[in-house]
Amino acid sequence: GIELIFDIANSVNDSLIIAGAVKDTVYMHQLSEVALAKGWRENQLHFTGFLSPQDAADLLAIADAVVLPFLDGGGEWNTSIHSALAQGTLVITTAVPPRGDEPQRNLFTAAPSDICEMRVALDRLAGRRRAPTPTEAQWQEIATAHLDFYHRCLCLDVSTQE
């Protein structure tokens, strides 16, 4: 869903940084062509390629928003969402079902492919920040989620044996 970003963000006011390594040069060229066709100028669009963990964290920390328009929706399992939220950066993404604005988490979710709702959220909320989550708290949340999952699995297994 990367190409949806060109419709969600504002080509008049925004700049886009698309982070991550993509080995498919044809696809990268297609993304650039789509962006230019939608009114984005070359100086507004930056592809970083591979970033070290520290460089990725630094980029997430200074971004006004991280927009992740997953075609099937994101979820609690998604490390991109967790990484951006941990830096205190606003995340606008998709979910099934969408939950809208969650200011306490600095997260906004729309239905997959709901470009209009994500655009409105980006215009209204970009730049909203919260304090970064300490690393220990991040791992505690992950450990708790895993324990809850295992507990539910064990309870299901016990109940099916009766």
Image (cartoon, helix red, strand yellow):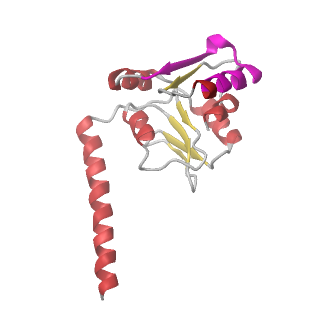
Residue most extreme to the top:
43
Vertical side of 90 occupied by 55: above or below: above
Residue 110, given in percent of the width and then of the height, sits at: 61, 46
User: Residue at point 49% right, 19% down?
Assistant: 48
Query: Residue 89 falls in which quadrant of the image?
Result: top left
Image: 130 above or below 76: above
Residue 156 x, y percent position in the rendering: 34, 76
Measured from the top left, where is residue 31 in percent x and y? 65, 26
Residue furthest out toward the left: 136
Q: Position of residue 153 (x, y in %)?
A: 32, 69
In magenta, the rendered stretch is: 28-50
Q: Residue at x 27, y 35 (%)?
A: 134
- The residue nearer to you, when weighing 86 against 19, is 19
Residue 32 part of the magenta-drawn span: yes
Location of residue 117 by image quarter = top right
Indicate left or right for 156 with 5 as reference. Answer: left
Residue 111 vs 36, above or below: the answer is below
| Residue at left offset 69%, top offset 23% | 35
State left or right for residue 136 relative to residue 8.
Answer: left
**In the figure, is residue 162 to the left or right of 92?**
left
Quarter of the picture holding the N terminus: top right
